[in-house]
Each structure stands twice: as structure tokens, then as C-alpha cells.
Image (cartoon, grey):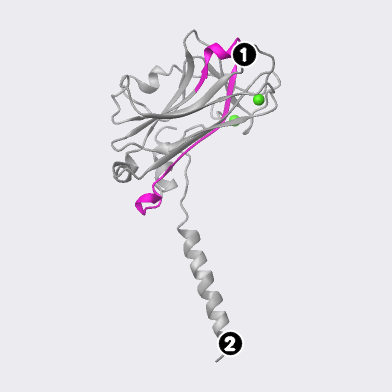
Amino acid sequence: MNTRRYSAIFIACATLVLAIAASALPAWANLVIDPSFEDQTAPFPLPSLAGVVSPIFTGGFWGAEAATEVTAESAVTPMCDVQMLRMVAEGGVVTQAFQAVYVGEDSLCIDRGLATVTLSAYLNTTELGGAVPVEGGATVFFYSCDTCWGNVVPYLTDPINLDNSPSTWQVSTASGPIPPGTRWLLVQMGFTEASLLGRPGYVDCVDMVIDVSGCGAVPTEAATWGRIKGLYR
Ligand SMILES: [Ca+2]
Ligand SMILES: [Ca+2]
């Protein structure tokens, strides 16, 4: 037996297996447009969130109640690149920023109940405040149609209490299964207004991915999502 030759074949096979495994790795694509709030030159006040959800869901941009894309300010430095989102109270319960994301590309897996979503975002606020910490978080709502705004729907959320240091960013991560029938995800960044006490809440580095590996399929190719995103730019 030519041990060296068999070793070489084994190594070659192992290399091939690794190459195949590498090529099958999912191309996780961030489905959020402008996740780092860099696409517009700061200061850029976001358009109304009504344009995102009414009369139909429209993807591809952020809308908000009271939010502006800004550069570093008040001792808060963006976590990703050079801009971030500053959100302030607007006289309600939660100050919100929305982005709608169409997920019909993954409908087969979603309707089998095997698709999951993970949405994360980094949050921050200025120092000084009141007796309560600022509460904020990332939330994803599940809608079955693009005219369903106003309906009570399932959602996933991860509210967190922020520390009092402007130098630290904290992550909020909402993750779980996507209900069958879902065709639109509504991404929300929000801060509880009663906790802001005049302080702004900052958001940066938003990321949302869908996992359809439970269906034995690789996630929707980045190229496909790239084409979808291209429609909105
Ligand atoms: Ca940024
Ligand atoms: Ca902080």
C-alpha cells in the first residue's frame, strides 16, 4: 500500500468536502436598507413613518415620528461608520422609527413554519437623566399583506434598559420564528418616552436576517436581495 498516496487522496477529499461545505454556507444578507444611517448626509430628518405603512407598506427607507440622522454629538459617537439615528419624544407613548421589509421570497419556508428572523440594533443615550434609565429596543411585527396596517399582529421584541454612559452601545436582539402567512416584516426602533426625560435615544448598526435552513434551503441569495434593494435606491 502506498500510504503517502492514500494520505494525499484523503487530504484531497477532505479539502473537497471543506470546499463544498464552504460554498454551501448561507449568504446571510442584512435585509434592512440603510442599516447604519449613512445613506443621506447628516443632518437628515427622517420622513414620516406614515409613508412606510400607509396606505400600503412601502419598503426601502426609514420613516419616523421624530428622528434625525446625525454625526457624533453630545459625547455619543456612532458605532458603525460616521452617522447614527437620533430619536426624541414626540408626545406619545413610544417614539418610533419604521422600515417595512417584503419577505415573499421566503414564503414557502415561512408557510411551513420553519423560518426564523433575528433583528438586532445598538442603542445609546446621553449621560445625565432622571431616576429611571432610558428604555428602548428593536421590535419586528409580522404582517400577512401590504394593506394590513392597523391590525393586531404577532411580534418579537427585546426592550433593554440603557446605562448612563454615552461611550457605551448596548445591543437589543429580537429573534424567533416567523408566523406562517407572513409576507411583510415591520422593523421598529423605539424608545419609551416616559423614560427619555428630555434625553435623545440613539440607534446604529441595525441588522436583520432570515434563517430558512430549517427547510433544507439556503437563505435567499444576497444577489436576490441586492436586486430588491436596488429597486429602492
Ligand atoms: Ca452608522
Ligand atoms: Ca450607553
Q: Are marks 1 and 2 in contact (CB under 8 Å)?
A: no
Residue 213, percent across and down? 40, 50
Residue 45, percent across and down? 53, 17
Residue at image position (54%, 29%) is 39
Q: Which residue is mark 2?
A: 3
Q: Amino acid at mark 2?
A: Thr
Does the beta carbon at disc 2 come under 8 Å from ligand 1?
no
Instruction: Quadrant for residue 149, please give it.
Output: top left
Image: magenta residue range: 190-218
Q: Is residue 78 left or right of residue 150?
A: right
- Split into quadrants, the picture shows ligand 1 in the one at top right
Quadrant placement of the N terminus? bottom right
Residue at image position (35%, 32%) is 184
Residue 88, percent across and down? 55, 14
Quadrant placement of the C terminus? top left
Position above or below: 80 against 159 = below
Number of numbered markers: 2
Q: Answer whether residue 197 is visible to the viewer in this image.
A: yes
Q: Which residue is mark 1?
A: 199
Q: Is residue 180 left or right of residue 232?
A: left
Instruction: Quadrant for residue 200, please give it.
Output: top right
Residue at image position (30%, 27%) is 146
Residue at image position (53%, 75%) is 12
